[in-house]
Image: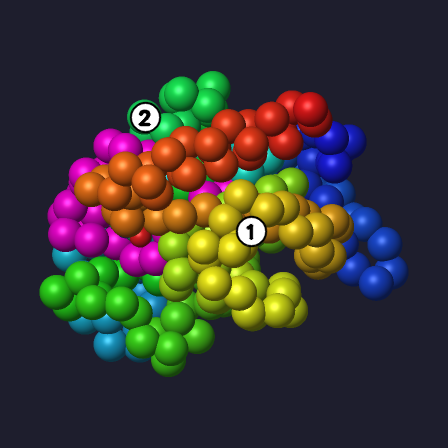
Amino acid sequence: MLFPLKGCIRIGSSRGAVTLAQSSKKARFEELTREVDSCCACGLGAGAKNRVVGEGDLDSRVVFVGEAPGRREDESGRPFVGSAGKLLDRLLADANMSRDRVFITNVVKCRPPGNRRPKREEVEACSGHLERLLEIIVPEVIAPMGNSAIGHVFERFGIEESVIGDAHGKPIRVQALWGEVVIFPLYHPAAAIYNRKLLGELEKDMLRLSRLLVGV
Ligand code: URA
């Protein structure tokens, strides 16, 4: 277990850890949601039906990070509810991690038109939202899914660029503002829907991640 402090947020600083009462996580998340809802740092918000901040357990030890909301997510305001989401739910359940006990979000909170890959400037404009979310949740593990998320998270934590075929399923320990965190790269579930080889890899990686969380 990387974080012994349960029931507290630990906000790291060079001068040491500061703890905040648990109830403030919810208030800070609500504040972040309001900020995302009124954000106009890039053009994507103007075309979005809903901005998708993310959902799950604010006390989760693991945060899954996808690329951006798709059509179903844009319509519902919830992350990973389309076909990739159904597969993610199944993979989580098979690895004994129910969806409501983890936290799921995306690098970009608004749907890019036509489900195109978010542009670099859109990712940069949105990066503060992900940063704040992670500071609220203080996860032990961040699991970026797919090339966009892996690229962003690797850059953010100063990890050398790598291709997903090499990086997936291999934990990397880094230092976050709030303490040590493990980056655990995964294939994107959408890539595994019609690719049995990738699906097998993703299934194995999810089991590895679940074992990592129980300290095996
Ligand atoms: N793909 C993503 O990257 N995120 C979602 O929320 C849904 C599909």
Crowd band around label 2 with a 10 angstrom C-alpha radius: few (<14), some (14–19), many (20+): some
Magenta span includes 44: no
Magenta span includes 85: yes
Residue at the extreme bottom of the image, as rendered: 121
Q: How many marks?
A: 2
Element assignment for label 1? helix
Q: Which mark is residue 172?
A: none
Front tag of 2 and 1:
2
Looking at mark 1, is its residue's CB closer than 8 Å to ligand 1? Answer: no
Crowd band around label 1 with a 10 angstrom C-alpha radius: few (<14), some (14–19), many (20+): some
Q: Is residue 120 left or right of residue 150?
A: left
Residue 210 occupies which quadrant of the picture?
A: top right
**Height in image: 52 above or below 87?**
below
Quadrant holding the C terminus: top right
How is the structure coloured here? Answer: rainbow
Question: x and y percent of residue 156 in the render?
Answer: 58, 67
Q: Amino acid at mark 2?
A: Arg
Q: Is residue 212 left or right of residue 108?
A: right
Mark pair 2, 1: CA separation:
24 Å
Residue position marked by numbered label 1 in the rendering: 134
Q: Earlier along the polypeptide chain: callout 2 or callout 1?
A: 2
Which region shows up in magenta?
A: 63-88
Q: Which residue lies at the image location 56% right of the left edge and 51% below the top edge?
A: 134
Along the line of sight, the residue nearer the viewer: 112 or 160? 160
Q: Amino acid at mark 1?
A: Leu
Q: Which mark is residue 90?
A: 2
